[in-house]
């Protein structure tokens, strides 16, 4: 079971799903924080979108490094 999970985690599909969800979380958190400070919906949406795009760009460039770190964390936990 763990070997199948590790094999799935090494696939390109998992990488895009995982980092896509992370980019969505970054968007939601940054939009909420920016809106709490500025009370402007459009501004918070635009800035949060820019932040999420930059996050996605850098994680797309570094996804192999992130994946190895995630796999190492998984090995420590299990």
Image (cartoon, rainbow, N blue to C red):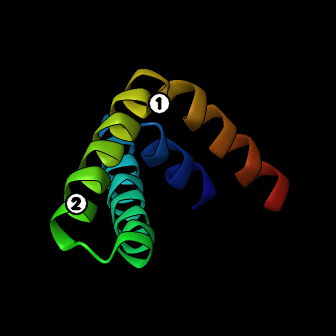
Q: Nearer the viewer, residue 20 or 52?
A: 52
Q: Which residue is mark 1?
A: 63
Identify the secondary structure beneath mark 2.
Answer: helix
Residue visible at 20% across and 73% down in the picture = 41
Question: Label 1 to label 2, Cα distance in Å?
Answer: 29 Å
Could you say where residue 25 lies in the image, as x and y percent from the top left? 40, 64
Within 10 Å of the Cα at label 2, are there few (<14), some (14-19), or many (20+) other Cα atoms?
Answer: some
Residue drawn 59% across the image and 26% down it: 65
Question: Considering the image in quadrants, where does the C terminus appear?
Answer: bottom right
Q: Nearer the viewer, residue 37 or 66?
A: 37
* Residue 61 position in % (x across, y down): 41, 21
Q: Residue at x 62, y 57 (%)?
A: 2
Nearer the camera: disc 1 or disc 2: 2
Choose top left, top right, bottom left or bottom right for residue 31: bottom left
Q: Is residue 56 left or right of residue 10?
A: left
Toward the viewer: 51 or 64? 51
Binning the other alpha carbons within 10 Å of mark 1 as few (below 14), some (14 to 19) or many (20 upward) gives some
Quarter of the figure with the N terminus:
bottom right
Q: Position of residue 49 (x, y in %)?
A: 24, 51
Tell me which label, 1 or 2, sits earlier in the chain.
2
Q: Left or right: 13 with respect to 19?
A: left
Q: Residue furthest left?
A: 42
Residue 34 - label: none
Residue found at x 15% / y 65%? 42
The residue under label 2 is 43
Name above or below for residue 24 compared with residue 10.
Answer: below
Image-based side of 72 in relation to 6, left or right: right
Name the quadrant containing residue 33: bottom left
Instruction: Examine the rendered structure and indicate whether residue 60 appears above or below residue 9.
Output: above
Q: Quadrant of residue 60?
A: top left
- Rendered position, 42 above or below 56: below
The percent position of residue 17, horizontal first and vertical second, equals 31, 52
């Amino acid at each position: 079971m763990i070997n199948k999970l590790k094999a799935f985690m090494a696939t390109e599909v998992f990488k895009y799903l995982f980092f896509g969800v992370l980019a969505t979380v970054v968007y939601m958190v940054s939009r909420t924080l920016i809106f709490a400070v500025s009370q402007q919906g459009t501004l918070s949406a635009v800035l949060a979108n820019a932040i999420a795009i930059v996050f996605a760009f850098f994680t797309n460039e570094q996804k192999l490094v992130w994946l190895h770190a995630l796999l190492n964390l998984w090995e420590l936990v299990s």
